[in-house]
Image (spheres, rainbow, N blue to C red):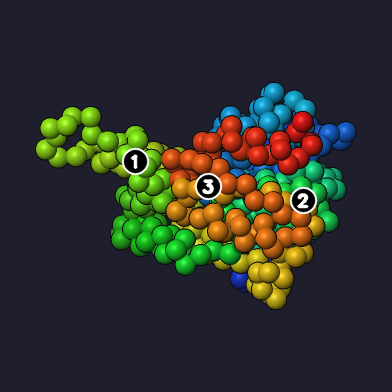
Amino acid sequence: MLERNYIHKGKLNLEAGGELEDINIRYHISCESPVGKKVIWICHALTANSDPSEWWDTLCGPGLLFDTDKYFVICANILGSCYGTTGPSNYAKAPMRRFPLVTIRDLVAAHELLRKHLGIETIDFLVGGSNGGFQSIEWAVSHPQVVRNLCLLATSAVVSPWCTATLEAQRMAILADPTFDEQKDLHGGAAGLAAARSMALTTYRNYEGYVATQFETDENFLLAHRAVTYQQYQGQKLVNRFDAYSYFSLTLGVDTHNIGRGRGGIEEALKKITARTLCIGIDSDILFPVEESARIADGVPHGVLEVISSDFGHDGFLLEYQQIGEAIRKQYELFN
């Protein structure tokens, strides 16, 4: 996919107060122009970048479900990230800890700026999983005329106390690293970030997933180590590609997710969605249980619930591509 940048000249007023000036939006597109093609907009999850052909390479690419040769496929890096869009790592006016609170609605506001810049009037298919689902459902509520078809994977209409608790535990781990508040450079909080990622992974997976992949192969082991080294590896892996300031900022943004805020509640907000909506829940997801998807499917005027099976919990939205593809093809003629 083609990497591009859009600098929006002027101020973006933020929902929680404050503003960002001259924001840069990093995005990837499958071709130069959407003219004459159906538009598929992919909203990425918490620490992903704007190139879904990298992290969703089983679904996005030439000849795949989100066919980059056939459709105008686009994904924009979210505000607060460290992959090119304006965030704590590159905003000189308010770097690191000084970066303002950016809500889910602010992420959608930035998407809207890019949509208008590219001359896209309607999105034929909007899809997002996890935090990407937060963006997608918020967009469909706030701009129903823009979204024709909507697919929400392993997500919710409002952040749950369980989700917030897991994120606060991760932020506490980052704050426990004294280098985070020192703010000498973007390596601050690295040890805390590694611990936070290790904690997060236990909510992305589940008991069955760990037993399937990290069980000790030596039946006479004295001290279990496979899961230990796996957690350490995953923590360092995120440190190598992300920074603690963006992670801290983005997790706070997750805690702002509430489509019912100022709209008369969740159920009233869901009624505003006019898009044909497919909600895909994962039977083993402990972070976003199936009932979260069911609530959305029951509340939108044109909602359908599909439940897929996985041993890998929440991460199934990235791994169970065959089931996801089958569910989408069954509901949308666009992909047949």
Residue at screen point 58% across, 46% down? 307
Seen in the image, is 331 located left or right of residue 160? right
Above or below — where is 295 with respect to 204? below
Estimate the spatial distance between the alpha carbons at disc 1 and disc 3, rounded to whole Å: 17 Å
Above or below — where is 63 with respect to 19? above
Estimate the spatial distance between the alpha carbons at disc 3 and disc 2, rounded to whole Å: 20 Å
| Quarter where residue 273 is shown | bottom right
Residue 265 versus residue 189: which sits nearer the camera? 265
> What percent of the width, then of the height, locates residue 161?
47, 67
Q: Which numbered circle lies on residue 282?
A: 3
Seen in the image, is 37 located left or right of residue 164? right
| Quarter where residue 303 is shown | bottom right
Residue 315 versus residue 191: which sits nearer the camera? 315
Q: What amino acid is labelled 2 in the image?
A: Arg
- Could you tell which of marks 1 and 2 lies nearer the N-terminus? 1
> What percent of the width, then of the height, locates residue 213?
34, 34
Which quadrant of the figure contains the C terminus? top right
Residue beneath label 1, please? 210
